[in-house]
């Protein structure tokens, strides 16, 4: 798995350096990953969940899955908050997500959303009471674009000859 670079947004880092490998947040109980469309949020979540033997699903699938089928999950990797919202003012998706998280009560939550659809302080305020009662306030990070070296690694891993020429 490619260890992508992320920038920590919340809580604001105490040191000047705020770019970290994604793996450095493995021990974080609650993590929100933001990224631009096509940045690789879904692939990052899918690979990380698979590598840890944990469950990956979209917000829609999470909300539609019976609670008893999700009981006992240590970590849930929940992708695509943005794709479930019907509009920017839709609070019901967040409310339903929080209710379901309380019912399932996983030890750790990983949630992804497109940067443009993340409602910042509003979403964070809505989610924080759940997170604070279940492992602590969330850390919010933003997935950085692939570096040229990361692009090369992906191409080589997919048997692409001459990655530099391809790029």
Image (spheres, grey):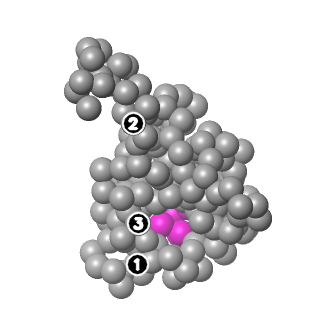
Residue 86 appears in the picture as rendered: yes
- Is 64 magenta? The answer is no
Given residues 98 and 19, the one toward you in this image is 19
Q: Position of residue 111 (x, y in %)?
A: 50, 56
CA gap, disc 1 and disc 3: 19 Å
Give the mark, 1 or 3, whose residue is nearer the N terminus. 1
Which residues, given as a range, are shown in magenta?
97-102
In the picture provided, is 129 more to the left or to the right than 151? right
Given residues 95 and 142, the one toward you in this image is 142
**Closer to us: mark 2 or mark 1?**
2
Chief secondary structure of the magenta span?
helix
CA gap, disc 2 and disc 1: 40 Å
Within-10-Å neighbours for mark 1: few <14, some 14–19, many 20+ = few
Residue 148 is tagged as 2
Q: Position of residue 63 (x, y in %)?
A: 40, 60
- Give the residue drawn at x 41%, y 66%: 115
Task: Reply above or below: 132 against 41.
Answer: below
Given residues 71 and 19, the one toward you in this image is 19
Q: Are marks 3 and 2 in contact (CB under 8 Å)?
A: no
Residue 92 is tagged as 1
CA gap, disc 3 and disc 2: 22 Å
- Give the residue drawn at x 41%, y 42%: 146
- Is 99 magenta? The answer is yes
């Amino acid at each position: 798995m490619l260890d992508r670079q992320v920038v920590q947004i919340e809580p604001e880092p105490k040191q000047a350096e705020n770019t970290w490998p994604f793996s450095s947040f493995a021990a974080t109980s609650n993590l929100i990953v933001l990224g631009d469309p096509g940045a690789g949020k879904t692939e990052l979540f899918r690979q990380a969940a698979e590598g840890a033997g944990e469950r990956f699903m979209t917000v829609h699938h999470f909300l539609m899955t019976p609670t008893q089928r999700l009981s006992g999950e240590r970590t849930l990797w929940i992708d695509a908050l943005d794709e479930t919202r019907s509009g920017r003012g839709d609070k019901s998706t967040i409310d339903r997500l929080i209710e379901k998280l309380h019912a399932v009560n996983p030890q750790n939550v990983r949630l992804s959303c497109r940067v443009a659809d993340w409602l910042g302080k509003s979403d964070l305020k809505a989610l924080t009471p759940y997170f604070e009662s279940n492992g602590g306030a969330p850390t919010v990070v933003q997935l950085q674009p692939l570096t040229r070296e990361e692009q090369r690694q992906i191409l080589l891993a997919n048997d692409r000859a001459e990655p530099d020429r391809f790029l």
